[in-house]
Amino acid sequence: MSDINVLKEYYVRYLRDVRGVKLSTVNHYLGAINVVSKYLSDSGKIKKTIYEIDELAELECIREFLFAQPDFVEKDERGNRMYSAGINNYIRFATGEDFGNIGNSVALMDIEVPISSKQTVTIENWRRNGIIKKQSIELASFLCEIDSAHKTFISASTNEQYMEGHHAIPFKEQAHFKVSLDVYANIVCLCPICHRMLHYGIKNDKETVLNKLYSDRAERLAHSGIYLSKDEFIEKAI
Ligand SMILES: [Zn+2]
Ligand SMILES: [Zn+2]
């Protein structure tokens, strides 16, 4: 499988399938991102495309850089601000700000994602996509997916209840799969206690939680090319 940009694939599905944006408008947004990507790679800021950026903070820096370039600002004004609209819209998607009201439509975005060549080099290089993790927490509306009543504290960066993203099937299992494990279907939003328990708890407690996660996620994992029986899931996730 060739390299794809997972965030681009998710963005297109988000606009088209989840938000029902007209195809012509989707293409308009993507076209703007392409122009901005070209500008950024010509300036040596990115390799090829904006979709390669996997941390929100980096994306914000890139936006700041763009708006500080007089030639970019002029080009944007000539183009009726389509480039700034394109980048702003994409960053809004990346923050996951609007993911709280998506609900089950998130399943429309579940796709098989090839393991990128970057990921296949060494296990140490399997880098988690911070944007996808952040979006997954927004998706769950900052509620623990084991029990939505679990309370934590207010996070200074989001002003919402503090939660953590967890890969149900851990990255150390990546070598056993032909598709990426860094996908929406495999990331769950957990309170820190449930999260630490899944990493450091006793087998019995973990199994109870993993049974629930399996019934919640098995179908979506399959849509993402991750086919596991309940026993296989528990064996890999425990
Ligand atoms: Zn974890
Ligand atoms: Zn919890």
Image: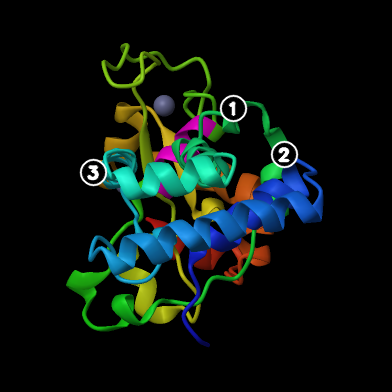
Residue 139 placement, left or right of 107: left
**Residue 210 locus on image (x, y percent):** 49, 47
Which tag is nearer the camera, tag 1 or tag 3?
Answer: 1
The amino acid type, in three-letter code, at marker 1 is Gly
In this view, the residue farthest toward the bottom is 1
The disc placed on residue 224 is none
Which tag is nearer the camera, tag 2 or tag 3?
Answer: 2
The front one of 222 and 58 is 58
- Nearest to N terminus: mark 1 or mark 3: 1
Kindly tell me whether residue 209 is visible in this rendering.
no
Callout 3: helix, strand or loop?
helix
- In three-dimensional space, the C-alpha distance between marks 1 and 3, rounded to whole angstroms, equals 29 Å
Asked if 165 appears above or below 158 in the picture, the reply is below
**Residue 105 locus on image (x, y percent):** 73, 42
Q: Which residues are magenta?
A: 131-138
Q: Which residue is mark 1?
A: 100
Disc 3 crowd, CA 10 A, few/some/many (<14, 14-19, 20+): few
The disc placed on residue 104 is 2
Say which quadrant the C terminus sits in.
Answer: bottom left
Kindly identify the residue that appears in the image at 65 percent across and 48 percent down: 215
The front one of 76 and 175 is 76
Q: Which residue is mark 3?
A: 200
